[in-house]
């Protein structure tokens, strides 16, 4: 004998289905730019800029600790794939199990590993770090210790071209630290011209396309006081234009 579905359940299903459809339609039109700030151990915002539309989720966050908070929030909300691959373009390897507390700017990668939020982490160093061989060697040792002694899935690369192909990576959260392009701290580097910055970003886009990397979220980390002030805004503008 057929049983009738209660009217309230039918309404509930229709509402949920309608919400899901509306969300899919909104996502099909593109994601807006979201801008966050970090206060203590909390992520504040976002400020939403609808004039920007992207094929993936895009966030600008002032401090790197906000990346860990953002990823945790989006994972728990089901807004990004479970256990994505993290690709970080930065001159820094922010992972040290001996540093406390775990959630801080110099240790946010360790926080992600310790909470098993990420499948694999690739940190890509900028080319200018070749002028700092001791820096590279020290952090390569740290990355190896993280993998071998702690079982944390961290790999340090010296070029984006060394990244595995997209089919091996799966869904990717791409984190780009502005210090990757311009850095007033050690290891320091100042691009000579705006064209140098634009060329670097164009090269990154080309490698991602060639490897068919499925970027489902882009996070731009401003890292105040690290990139040169007169170059930071231009870098952000070029990145946003490149990923639109």
Image (cartoon, rainbow, N blue to C red):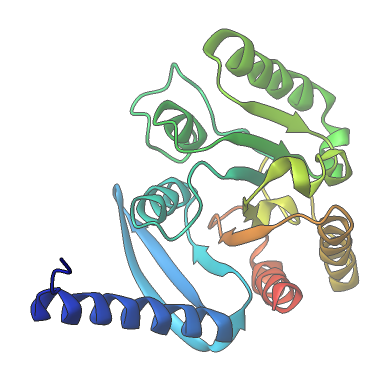
Farthest residue in the top direction? 149
Question: Where on the picture, by quarter, is residue 205?
Answer: bottom right
Question: Where on the picture, by quarter, is residue 17?
Answer: bottom left
Q: Position of residue 110 (x, y in %)?
A: 48, 29
Pick whichever, 64 or 46, lies toward us.
Answer: 46
Q: How many marks?
A: 0
Q: Residue at 63% of width from left, 10% of height from top?
A: 148
Q: Position of residue 198 (x, y in %)?
A: 85, 70
Q: Position of residue 154 (x, y in %)?
A: 63, 27
Is residue 187 visible in this depiction of the protein? no
Q: Residue at 71% of width from left, 19% of height from top?
A: 138
Q: Residue at 71% of width from left, 70% of height from top?
A: 239
The N terminus lies in quadrant: bottom left
Q: Residue at 53% of width from left, 28% of height from top?
A: 95
Vertical relation: 13 (above or below) 81: below
Pick whichever, 135 or 20, lies toward us.
Answer: 20
Q: Is residue 2 left or right of residue 32?
A: left
Q: Is residue 135 left or right of residue 59?
A: right
Q: Position of residue 177 (x, y in %)?
A: 63, 53
The C terminus lies in quadrant: bottom right
Farthest residue in the bottom direction? 51
Q: Is residue 204 left or right of residue 35?
A: right
Pick whichever, 131 or 218, lies toward us.
Answer: 218
Pick whichever, 83 or 39, lies toward us.
Answer: 83
Is residue 66 visible in this depiction of the protein? yes
């Amino acid at each position: 004998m057929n049983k009738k579905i209660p009217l309230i359940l039918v309404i509930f299903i229709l509402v949920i289905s309608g919400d899901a459809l509306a969300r899919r339609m909104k996502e099909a039109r593109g994601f807006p730019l979201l801008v966050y700030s970090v206060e203590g151990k909390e992520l504040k915002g976002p400020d939403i800029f609808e004039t920007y539309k992207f094929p993936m989720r895009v966030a600008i966050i002032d401090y790197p600790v906000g990346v860990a908070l953002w990823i945790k929030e989006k994972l728990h909300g089901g807004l990004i794939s479970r256990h994505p691959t993290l690709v970080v373009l930065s001159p820094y390897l922010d992972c040290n199990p001996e540093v406390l507390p775990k959630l801080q700017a110099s240790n946010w990668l360790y926080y992600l590993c310790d909470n098993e939020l990420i499948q694999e982490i690739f940190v890509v160093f900028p080319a200018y770090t070749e002028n700092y061989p001791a820096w590279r060697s020290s952090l390569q040792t740290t990355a190896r210790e993280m993998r071998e002694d702690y079982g944390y899935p961290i790999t340090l690369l010296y070029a984006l071209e060394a990244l595995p192909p997209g089919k091996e990576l799966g869904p990717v959260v791409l984190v780009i630290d502005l210090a990757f392009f311009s850095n007033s701290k050690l290891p320091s580097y100042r691009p000579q011209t705006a064209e140098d910055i634009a060329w670097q970003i164009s090269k990154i886009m080309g490698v991602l396309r060639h490897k068919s990397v499925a970027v489902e979220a882009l996070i731009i980390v401003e890292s105040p006081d690290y990139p040169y002030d007169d170059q930071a805004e231009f870098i952000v503008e070029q990145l946003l234009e490149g990923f639109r």
